[in-house]
């Protein structure tokens, strides 16, 4: 158990360290590109390159959001956050998705204004093409590296930030088209390409934000993943059936709650071991599942109505011993097993086999059953001799 906890902590620490590393690299690249784009944009008379530089500066804000979320998301569970801090990452993903949509609106509006104004008075120089090409290459490399880390740790937040890098690369493609088109006499290509890229970025931002919001409201996993979980549980030895299977996501991880039905006659320890086997199997076979809460049922509590207020062991045995006080064999009861099934209590008495030398098992069963008949919560009494 300690080894498993240590492995989980190590995985969280590795996830945190790699998230911070790739985000810091992205922040440095964003800062350098922003400075170069803005300076060269002014020198080369390229408004689109200046705007692209401002876009790169805005990426620094999202990098800061990712760093803040990563710092909190990897922390262990505490008294205030008993389920951990993974939802910090989910909230950051929502923020990044909204930022992408806002950026897309800005690109589309800016392109529309430029198209409405007609051909610009000053055409950009070739230096803008070089800087835009460098931006496309560097941001695409950064995008692919960030996606690699995001997929490795199944991090929607890093995946969102990766697409933010690609949006910057795409906006630089717009600059390339705009500058190249302007130099070739097709000045309007800049605006048309910008609108197309803006719509694509808006779609990406919407999907990221919407999926994160679905996670915040505990939307279930995809049907095929739920079916895979169901199959893994039902194939576990000792599981008769399952019901109330619930799933949800938390920062790239999946959590499962399930009720499994086992034989009502097995011991508590065997039932517990079956539940632990189910938990370990689902975590091992379903990649994103990190925790499974298993509830053991001796019967299908969806099909069987909720039982009335049945007495617990101490109260019931006190009543029964009062009713059995005239039975001599009652003084020799070794143990009592109770089964709470179908809204009643089944009572199993464990008696020494030596009692059968004086009377039959059928007679003893009749005596105990008749004496307990007035106890409405008891369905029947069965005797076991040892």
Image (tube, helix red, strand yellow):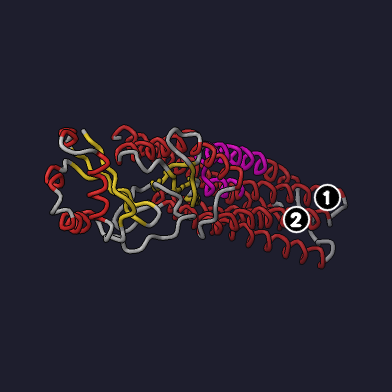
Image quadrant in which the N terminus is located: top left
Q: Position of residue 343 (x, y in %)?
A: 38, 57
Q: Quadrant of residue 320?
A: bottom left
Between 335 and 193, the residue placed more toward the observer is 335
Tag 1 secondary structure: helix
| Residue shown at the point (69%, 51%) measured from the top left | 171
Image quadrant in which the C terminus is located: top left
Q: Give me the C-alpha separation between circle 2 and circle 1.
A: 13 Å
User: How many numbered markers are drawn?
Assistant: 2
Q: Position of residue 248 (x, y in %)?
A: 50, 51
> What secondary structure predominates along the stretch shown in magenta?
helix
Residue 12 vertical position relative to residue 213 in the rendered view, above or below: above
Q: Position of residue 156 (x, y in %)?
A: 54, 48
Q: Quadrant of residue 45?
A: bottom right
Between 104 and 336, the residue placed more toward the observer is 336
Name the disc covering residue 181, or none. 1
Name the disc covering residue 227, or none. none
Is label 2 or label 1 in front?
Answer: 2
> What's drawn in magenta, residue-wise?
134-163
Q: Quadrant of residue 47?
A: bottom right
Question: Circle 1: is it few (<14), some (14-19), or many (20+) Cα within 10 Å?
Answer: some
Question: Circle 2: is it few (<14), some (14-19), or many (20+) Cα within 10 Å?
Answer: many
Judging by the rendered image, the residue that carries numbered circle 2 is 194
Between 349 and 77, the residue placed more toward the observer is 349
Residue 155 vertical position relative to residue 103 in the rendered view, above or below: above
Tag 2 secondary structure: helix
């Amino acid at each position: 158990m300690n080894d498993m906890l240590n492995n989980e902590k190590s995985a969280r620490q590795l996830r945190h360290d790699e998230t911070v590393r790739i985000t810091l690299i992205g922040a440095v690249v964003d800062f350098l590109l922003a400075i170069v784009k803005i300076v060269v944009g002014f020198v080369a008379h390229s408004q689109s390159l200046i705007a692209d530089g401002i876009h790169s500066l805005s990426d620094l804000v999202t990098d800061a959001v990712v760093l803040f979320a990563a710092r909190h998301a990897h922390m262990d569970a505490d008294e205030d956050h008993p389920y951990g801090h993974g939802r910090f990452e989910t909230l950051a993903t929502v923020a990044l998705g909204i930022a992408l949509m806002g950026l897309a609106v800005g690109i589309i509006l800016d392109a529309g204004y430029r198209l409405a104004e007609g051909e610009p008075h000053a055409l950009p120089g070739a230096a803008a093409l070089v800087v835009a090409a460098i931006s496309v290459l560097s941001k695409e490399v950064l995008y692919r590296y960030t996606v690699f880390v995001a997929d490795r740790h199944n991090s929607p937040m890093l995946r969102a930030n990766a697409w933010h890098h690609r949006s910057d690369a795409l906006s630089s493609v717009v600059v390339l088209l705009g500058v190249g088109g302007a130099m070739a006499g097709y000045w309007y290509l800049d605006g048309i390409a910008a609108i197309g890229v803006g719509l694509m970025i808006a779609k990406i931002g919407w999907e990221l934000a919407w999926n994160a919001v679905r996670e915040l409201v505990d939307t279930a996993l995809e049907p095929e993943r739920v079916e895979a979980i169901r199959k893994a549980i039902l194939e576990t030895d000792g599981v008769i059936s399952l019901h109330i299977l619930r799933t949800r996501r938390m920062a790239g991880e999946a959590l499962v709650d399930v009720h499994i039905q086992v034989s009502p006659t097995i011991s508590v320890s065997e039932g517990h071991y079956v539940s632990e086997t189910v938990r370990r199997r689902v975590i091992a076979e379903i990649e994103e599942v990190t925790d499974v809460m298993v509830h053991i049922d001796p019967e299908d509590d969806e099909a069987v109505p909720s039982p009335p207020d049945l007495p617990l062991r101490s109260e019931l045995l006190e009543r029964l011993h009062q009713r059995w006080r005239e039975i001599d064999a009652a003084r020799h009861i070794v143990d009592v097993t109770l089964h709470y099934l179908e809204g009643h209590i089944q009572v199993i008495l464990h008696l020494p086999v030596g009692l059968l030398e004086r009377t039959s098992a059928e007679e003893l069963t009749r005596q105990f059953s008749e004496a307990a008949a007035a106890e409405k919560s008891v369905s029947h009494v069965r005797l076991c001799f040892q």
